[in-house]
Amino acid sequence: MNLTPSFFSYLLHLADDTLILGQRNSEWTGHGPVLEQDIAITNISLDLFGQTRNIFQYAATLYNESGEDAQKEIEALLPQPWKSYGRELQEDDLAFLRDERQYRNTLLVELPRGDWAHTVLRQFFFSAFQHLQYHALTKSSDQQLAAIAEKALKEVTYHLRWSSEWVIRLGDGTEESHRRMTQALGTLWPFTGELLLPTAYELEAAQEGRGINPSGLRDAWTEKVDAIFSEAGLERPSTAWMQSGGKEGRHSEHLGFLLTELQYLQRTYPNLTW
Amino acid sequence: MISEQAIWQLLEEVKDPEVPVLSVVDLGIIRSVHTEGERIELVITPTYSGCPAMDTIRMDIRLKLLEKGFREVDIKQSLSPAWTTDWMTEGGRQKLEAYGIAAPLPRQQFCSSDLFHEEAVSCPRCKSYHTELISQFGSTACKSLYRCLDCHEPFDYFKCH
């Protein structure tokens, strides 16, 4: 498969979404509301990191195997410090050494973890989307991406089930849990639109048959949200105005802080391995 | 020159670091073994995308083969078709039960992704089906946590995947 700026951006977008959400969820490790759920959210992080690694490894391989001309074209997407290392591109370089504006994740996944209601509702919105997205990607004309999606889909099925149950449990739980869920919904809803709003590189990747246009998933996603919300006693907000920009590198103030922690080791001890 | 069958036998000695009663063959993650002269090519498939044991397993396979004098070992990873617990061997399932972990139910017949649905899992200690799910996620990515309501022991269930 040939390397193009749009496809490389597309891979970064997929991997950044799972990387940043995994990092956010991992903040619960040791702080979960009960031990079993602490383990659950940590396991979900682990799955997300595994998916991230598969995609970054693939992106790095694609880059390393491409000709100089194709490599030059994606210069702006590569991590600056790596360029002085004089070795092939590796998955960790992509995860730990890019600048904030080079990340292609949605704003939704970088928002602070908030309380447990925020965390499970965000996971639900994301998993419901990722499930549809990866399902469609199993038919990608890019065989490696299709295989990564096929593998991940089984894991995402568990995430979707777990987060759906929590949305129902809290939405249809006590007065306090319902209040917290409603509050989380108010905060998170304006960030859901970006999942379904295609960027130029997504459209290009879709046109090549390698990626998918997320706007085609809108009906199925909305249907899933409505189905769970009706059991949870929650109402889908009618707000039409949505935040966007993350997928194109325009992030909220939260991402920088997250990256500082995520990248600390590789920034402090460049090229460290163990 | 070594036969492919002999390599399969050697691989029986490489254990899953997180469930040390299971070999990599029992787990069903070895997809193919191919030998050509002194060269050995293996294809393995990960259980879960993020399973931290996979890196260790890859290294353990290499060390085991090195120990037997095989230096040219090429381990390739294949993601599709995706690993399923249905690939676990019958011997593997029995070893799991004896170790105190409930073996995975056959995926097609029993496993569903329905909400609030619990699979009827038998307690590996007292064999009772009077058990309940504590959490879909357990001590490792591949297990969920159950409790037996008869003998009152908690136990791991190697979940359908």
Image (tube, rainbow, N blue to C red):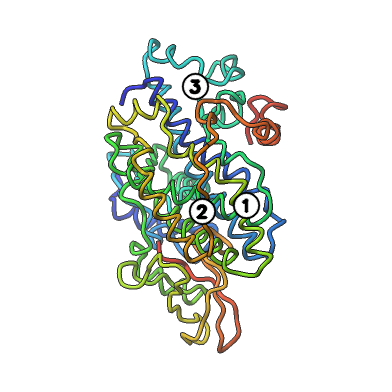
Q: Earlier in the sequence, mark 2 or mark 3?
A: 3
Task: Give the quadrant of residue B111.
Answer: bottom left
User: Is B112 situated left or right of A127 in this image?
Assistant: left
Kindly report the distance in space between the C-alpha atoms of the residues bearing marks 2 and 1: 12 Å
**Marks 3/1 same chain:** yes
Residue with the mark numbered 2: A124
Closer mark to the observer between disc 2 and disc 3: 2
Q: Secondary structure at mark 2?
A: helix
| Residue depth check, mark 2 versus mark 1: number of the one nearer the observer | 1
Q: Which of the marked residues, 2 or 1, is nearer the chain's N terminus?
A: 2
**3 and 1 marks in contact (CB < 8 Å):** no
The residue singled out by tag 3 in the image is A88
Q: Residues within 10 Å of mark 2 (few under 14, many from 20)?
A: many
Amino acid type of the residue tagged 3 in the rendering: Glu
From the viewer's side, name the closer residue of B72 and B27: B27
Estimate how packed mark 1 is, as few (under 14), some (14 to 19) or many (20 or more) residues with alpha carbons within 10 Å. many
Query: What residue do we see at 36% from left, 47% from top?
Result: A219
